[in-house]
Amino acid sequence: MSTLKVENLTKEYGDVIALDEVSFEIEDEFAVLLGESGAGKSTLLRCANGLTDPTEGAIYLDDEEITGSQSDVGMIFQQHNLVDGVSAYLNALTGSLDHVSLVRSLFQWQPREDKLRALEALETVGLLDEAHQRVSQMSGGQQQRVGIARALVQDPRLLLADEPVASLDPASAETVMGYLRKAAMEHNVTALVSLHQVNIAAHFGDRFIGLRDGEKLFDVGRDELTPELIDELYGSVETVGLAETDDGGAPEEADAVEELLEESRRVEA
Ligand SMILES: Nc1ncnc2c1ncn2[C@@H]1O[C@H](COP(=O)(O)OP(=O)(O)OP(=O)(O)O)[C@@H](O)[C@H]1O
């Protein structure tokens, strides 16, 4: 159970305003950051992870201001950032490196509870049977699941993921997102995930925050994410490469999103 509060967050890089007074609060939710390239998604996640200092405003995790890298914030990257030559298990174990050094983890001189946590995390992402496989021999989707396990071993209060499935094929992307959501739910962790793929976002998110040119365009729940909002967020159809229907009506992806949303509402009803 955790609350992430983003308060009037502004980040400037010289003349570029990457984030402009963005505010929202998420609590025990699986929230998705949407927006086209350059909208400010990565900058917001970097501020939430303490990797970047805001120019103005602040981010709070359970009322404590985030000021610098925090061990209770787990981060999942697009390029898994794993150690290739070693097993999934040892990679997961490195999630607890705030407690002990890399050398100790490689020689497995690690507390028993950390080892158990690494195995439990691999089980959460469906990789317990592959624990001793080298990550270099795993698929991109499996590697990303190891990345999720590693973040879980940190025992985080907040999970952040920056385009975690951008480099995966659609089927693997769905699988990885399923495990990411399961990981957040099972561990009661608030999650903030940036995604390009609107259909995947609609399938997995509880909450959607749309950024455009560094400003918050919307902050809506599952029932309120409409094709019109998506259109407004991405501007022209060409911008996101969506196909327009023959009659010039709603883009095909917007229709697909609406269908997905209806389906998830039916399932929840
Ligand atoms: N270190 C930096 N120095 C200067 N400008 C930066 C830096 N990082 C980001 N920017 C600028 O800030 C704006 C927001 O970038 P950001 O990477 O947060 O967007 P994004 O939504 O994550 O885009 P993408 O989906 O392409 O990663 C962009 O105009 C970008 O060029």
Image (cartoon, rainbow, N blue to C red):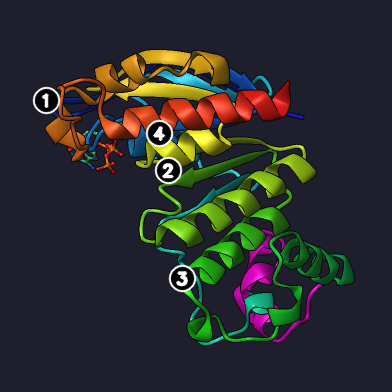
Comes first in the chain, label 4 or label 2: 2
Q: Which residue is mark 2?
A: 51
Q: Residue furthest front?
A: 247
User: Residue 168 is drawn in which quadrant?
Assistant: bottom left
| Mark 1, secondary structure of its residue | loop
Amino acid type at image mark 2: Leu
| Picture coordinates of residue 167, whole percent (x, y) | 36, 60
Q: Residue placed at 62% from the left, 50% from the top?
A: 178
Q: Label 2: few (<14), some or many (≥20) within 10 Å?
A: some
| Picture coordinates of residue 100, whole percent (x, y) | 70, 68
Q: Which residue is mark 4?
A: 256
Disc 1 under 8 Å from ligand 1? The reply is no
Q: CA distance from mark 4 to mark 3?
A: 26 Å
Q: Which residue is mark 3?
A: 140
Q: CA distance from mark 4 to mark 2?
A: 36 Å
Near-viewer residue (216 or 46): 216
**From which residue to which does the magenta span run?**
91-110
Q: CA distance from mark 2 to mark 1?
A: 20 Å
Near-viewer residue (132 or 199): 199
Q: CA distance from mark 1 to mark 3?
A: 37 Å
Task: Report the disc number at residue 220.
Answer: none
Q: Which residue is mark 1?
A: 15
Q: Nearer the viewer, mark 4 or mark 1?
A: 4
Q: Residue placed at 65% from the left, 83% from the top?
A: 106
Q: Nearer the viewer, mark 2 or mark 3?
A: 3
Q: CA distance from mark 4 to mark 1?
A: 38 Å
